[in-house]
Image (tube, coloured by chain):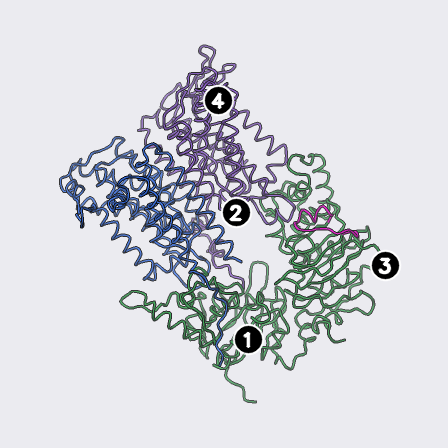
Chain colours: A blue, B green, C purple
Amino acid sequence: MSTLTLGGRTAVPAKYLPVLVTGCLFVAMFAVGGFRYEGFASGQVILNVFIDNAFLLVVAVGMTFVILTGGIDLSVGSVVALSTMISASLMEGPGWPPYLVIPLVLAIGSGLGLVMGYIVHAFDIQPFIVTLAGMFLARGLCYTIGTDSIPIRDPTFTAFAQTRIDLFADLWISPSVVIAVVVVVVAAYVLHYTRFGRSVYAAGGSEQSALLMGLPVGRTKITVYTVSGFCSALGGVLLSFYMLSGYGLHAAGMELDAIAAVVIGGTLLTGGSGFLFGTVLGVLVLGLIQTIIIFEGTLLSWWTKIFIGMLLFVFILLQRLFSARSRR
Amino acid sequence: MDVPVPVLTMRGIGKQFPGVKALDGVDLRLLPGEVHALMGENGAGKSTLIKVLTGVHPADAGTIELAGAPVAFGSPLEAQQAGISTVYQEVNLCTNLSVAENILLGREPRRWGRIDWKRMRARAGELLSRLELSLDVSAPLSTYSLAIQQMVAIARAIDVDARVLILDEPTSSLDADEVLQLFRVMRRLKEEGIAILFVSHFLDQVYEISDRMTILRNGRLVGEFMTERLPQVELVAKMIGQELAALERLHGEAKVFDRPLIEARGLGRAGAIEPFSLTVHEGEVVGLAGLLGSGRTEIARLLFGADHAGTGEITVSGSPASLRTPRAAMTHKIAFCSENRKEDGLIPDLTVRENIILALQATRGWTRPVPREQQDELVGRYIKALKISPPNPEHLVRNLSGGNQQKVVLARWLILEPRLLILDEPTRGIDVGAKTEIQRLVAELSDGGVAVLFISAELEEVLRLSHKVEVLRDRRLVAELPNDEALTSDVLMETIASGGRAE
Amino acid sequence: MRRLLWPVVVLVLLLALNVFFSPGFFSIQVRDGHLYGSLIDILRFGAPLILVSLGMTLVIATGGIDLSVGSVVAISGALACLQISQGASLFTAVALALGLSLVLGAWNGFLVAGIGIQPIIATLILMVAGRGLAQLITDGQIITVNSPAYKVIGGGYWLTVPFGILIVLAVLAVTAFLTRRLALGMLIESVGGNAEASRLAGIRARGIIIMVYAFAALCAGVAGLMISSNVSSADGNNAGLWIELDAILAVVIGGTALSGGRFSLGGTVLGALIIQTLTTTIYSIGVPPETTLLFKALVVTAVCLIQSPSFRAKALRRRGRAAVPGPASEEKVRVSL
């Protein structure tokens, strides 16, 4: 009998388009940088972007999960700060060993995320407000622990923080980069190859449909905030490696950077569409902007924010155009 | 006759909602390998029956048997697991995900806990080929038309060894070719022995595809019929029902209308209403008759500029007018009380007074507030005239009863002194007293020279009020009938049923 | 007025707590022809927050939100101080700063109403870029100005009353006039309460929404002048940091729902005063001031839970009422059967 082939407009798989745009942007920025500045076009410059932004990458991974379900998590920056603060104070004060402190910190971060996710799901309160409360709470807790920066002098910790992992040809990375890459790979696997990952996409695409299809939407939502809390705590641990201190003012405004990275990486803020690889690119683009501004020398740091804002605008506009087109 | 054993039997189903008896002693049986149409007008209880069957609501009374065993489902998921799948009018899938995922989400083939994408695509392809479809199953669902999405929903539904497939208005957003395609799939499933419960407002489609039908009216069972033995007129009569007491017409003598107010020529909108022409004269009450989904509301929305017309033109008092927005229509003194007063009419948090003066204020802009004395005077006058109760202008409109809310919306438009008032189901779901008052008001307005476009599912009401009746069917304006002695609800039903083709 | 009951109770309790710890709390004196006292301080220091919250109230009433007000505060202060430090007149400086604020607000409104971007996201752009813009204006420095005339805006007195309080009163009066005397308030509530019904009633929502965002930015601009004038300097990085969150909080405490619709200017003022009093109280009872954030977190959570219908339904059910299916759970399975 006749089989029908219907619909299916031929196109570059539209879902990869935003990531492609970000990828091109990254390459273009790198090329321009390479032409303009001496010593820019080296592998170590890219690796440095990873080294300097490993914590942001981990936090942005958690944020990607949340945004994919159509939510938002404003608490991440504060949870990062809280993690550095708890780590530093426990290691400096009572002198707890890192292998006790780090799991504790990760558990606290995940617990905060779990509670926020539960409130979002069970009481139907906007994620924006719930995580805003979480943000206040975590920063407040930081300041109750202490208002000054606490240095970290634990030998294991500092040794780990100063380790260089040499790659070929004089290139090197920090252990944090390895951790961040592992997080990205695991998260990408979860999103792509597990039922939980797919229900994250389904819930973000249409919560009502996902419910009718019998997916555990509530559990999914609670889990993504827990994941985000965990990632923030881990990002905090990485930041304390980087800073070797705990401070309530660490990571101020990091939630904005994480959101910006996710959006620039092509993930729809309304949920349901996007890739972790895009988020990685987003973080790289943000990092590269900073690098260029450092290389430029005369350009001053606030241009970073203006550029990020402009990029955000362009990408949001693109998203809007895409969604307007696909609705037709 | 050799009667096969029903796969599903519902007996004596009753369901009570606060203040409404939604279902009362309804029976339904589905035979394997048949397409069974569930028919009834708005509020007949079709959707409640389906909700009871699929476990959205528990039944208050009656029994459900699936293949001879009594069942009671706690959720749509449980019903689905037992083999009763539902495909809704709005496709409830995730269009951001691939076709394969939409078919298999929640039961993806896995290997060592990891989703096996290859097997998943293969399985999805198999299921689709069962429906004689071949699609790129890794493409996102959003790249396909609604009809295909509908089929994907069906593919998902039948994957779980469905014995009963419920299709709730699956055709309402499909075009003719897409409907044919859907029917081909339905016939195929029927051959496989699946019982299909089909809900549609399109009579032609029901007659084309269904073998048997169950008709509901006001939550009660009218009966079960073989489709081929039930003439369309009888079907319409059974769905609409007839009030035995003939009401006197409010317009006794035939008037002559010679001053056209609104003339629409070839006005239409793809997917909503086919191009139609319609003239409404000053002081004339024009009734729109037709079943639910026949295009009544769509005509009203086009004339008010609530939707953009795709084709055609409108003249107001002889000069061409562009009614692109409600605001533009309002400048031509056209007013529209929508069918759905909760969603399209009221601002529930505002008071009765604010809701009433809202449209007047909108025409003045925010810089020129309606003076408080004038507000109080206008609102007071209409609260009195329409007997809005409680007669407190500062009461929040959300706390009013349905009838009074309707009067508030009416008052909002009446204070604008419209020349054409479009009323979409103004008397639905309100008590008898309020209903008569609204009908009387329409007659008074007409006597005062206001033209009224009156939409109602109740033919008697349309006949009682209108000077002429426009008959709609399947999104087409099929006939215009002057409301004279010869026009009865029987004639109207005949016209609806035949689509104006036969005499 | 019952809606304002809880905010009033909370404020009174907070004030009472202060009297308990410092008995002279309520005393107001006139020194050097200026009003002095703790209450006056609360009003004076709370003035910028009240202003920003007033603008935010209208935005939230339309069903939107404005995250960028903090950045606008910084930009406005930066521009004004820059102008004054370059020798411009007070009038020019203020006019330019407020003009730029209006433009930025209109930009937000255009993104929301013109392009149709979700308000949170649309205003996020300016929230991020605006900080950079403010630092661009100040060239990354903290601009200090030495202009007695400019100092009056945030730190001056007029007829013994701090000038900032007078500005707040004036803006409050103007807002109340526009919304409650003129018909703006009703149209805003209508758009926020039911956008489709408002369209069908002939309301042109687009203009109203753009205007409301512009107004919010204008309020933020005035607050920015006040903050920078008070310290005679502009700090692009830290001026108005997180004030948007406090403002949203003030609006929510004041009984305006985040979903839009009915708004209460009085409630918002109360909400802002509660936040300011909370800060003052924490200082006066000797708790470390940094814990203010903890209290805010508790207040946000409590207020939102009280406003949440499904929380109320659950709380009621736990109290042993008949198990009615909650409206929220009903919503979730709303299918077009």
Q: Are marks 4 and 2 on the same chain?
A: yes
Mark 3 chain:
B
Q: Which residues are magenta?
A: B316-333
Mark 4 belongs to which subunit? C
Q: What type is the residue that disc 3 sits on?
A: Lys
- Tag 1 and tag 4, C-beta contact below 8 Å: no
Q: Secondary structure at mark 4?
A: helix
Q: Which residue is mark 1?
A: B183
Residue type, label 4: Gly
Mark 4 vs mark 2, foreground winner is 2
The mark lying in front, picked from 3 and 1, is 1
Q: Position of residue A31 (x, y in %)?
A: 33, 46
Disc with the residue nearer the chain's start (4 vs 2): 2
Q: Which residue is mark 4?
A: C164
Query: Is label 4 on the same chain as label 3?
Result: no
Position of the C terminus of chain B, as image quadrant, is bottom right
Rounded to the nearest angstrom, the CA distance separating label 2 from label 3 is 50 Å
State how far apart marks 1 and 4 are (Cα). 73 Å
Residues at circles 4 and 2 in contact by the CB criterion of under 8 Å: no
Amino acid tagged 1: Phe
Residue placed at 59% from the left, 79% from the top? B212
The magenta stretch spans residue A312: no
For the residue pair C207 and B211, the one nearer the viewer reads as: C207
Would you name the residue on which mark 2 appears? C116
Report the amino acid beneath label 2.
Answer: Gly
| Same-chain check, marks 3 and 1 | yes
| x then y, percent, for residue C280 | 38, 26
- Specify the quadrant of the image occupied by residue A298: top left
